[in-house]
Image (cartoon, rainbow, N blue to C red):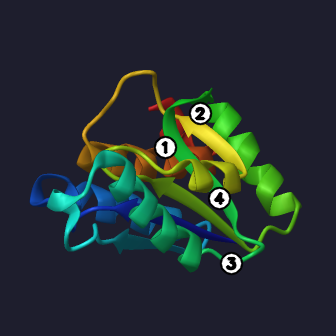
Amino acid sequence: MKIHFWTVGKAHESYVKEGIEMFTKRVSNYYPVEWSIIPTPKNAASLSEADLKKKEGETILQLLQKDDYLIVLDERGKQLSSEGLASFIQTRANESTKNVIFLIGGAFGVSDTVTQRGNFKWSLAQLVFPHQLVRLMLAEQVYRACSILRNEKYHHQ
């Protein structure tokens, strides 16, 4: 199984880049992992919120393969404990899922078509966080889940 982190927007900001890279490297000790940054459309400033979400959604749907397991991050999604996330990841591995994609949408979220294509809608919290911080928190939480699966001490520190 390969883990993909997809995010719509610009490159990692320097204030989170080091942490994202550190936790991504740690996740790679368990699963192959990679980040994909999907750029916002060039004319984003001139688009309505709905049109921007639609364009971003079209790009995301073109990138997805039929068998990809898509997890859409959304504050209205289901919340999981760290142990719950670990179990969720283990279930995907047990099902021989080839690609698990964690998607952080654009500034206004994701289009309904992307949400409908998603296999799971996950909420880190009911709070809304800056996208840059969500990237760091996502990488850290996936690493934490992997360490729980291996019964390693990170989760208990």
Q: Is residue 38 above or below residue 143?
A: below
Query: Mark 2: which amino acid?
Result: Ser
Q: Are marks 2 and 1 in contact (CB under 8 Å)?
A: yes
Residue indicated by mark 1: 141
Query: Mark 3: which amino acid?
Result: Gln
Mark 2 or mark 1, earlier in chain = 2
Secondary structure of residue under mark 3: loop
Q: CA distance from mark 3 to mark 1?
A: 25 Å
Mark 4 or mark 2, earlier in chain = 4
Q: Quadrant of residue 108?
A: top left
Residue indicated by mark 2: 82
Q: CA distance from mark 2 to mark 1?
A: 7 Å
Q: Position of residue 79 (x, y in %)?
A: 60, 27
Q: Position of residue 18 (x, y in %)?
A: 21, 61
Residue indicated by mark 4: 70
Q: Quadrant of the C terminus?
A: top left
At x 12%, y 53%, the residue is 15
Residue indicated by mark 3: 65
Residue placed furthest toward the top: 126
Residue 44 visible in the shown view = yes
Secondary structure of residue under mark 2: helix
The one of 101 and 63 positioned closer to us in this rendering: 63
Image depth: mark 2 or mark 3 in front: 3
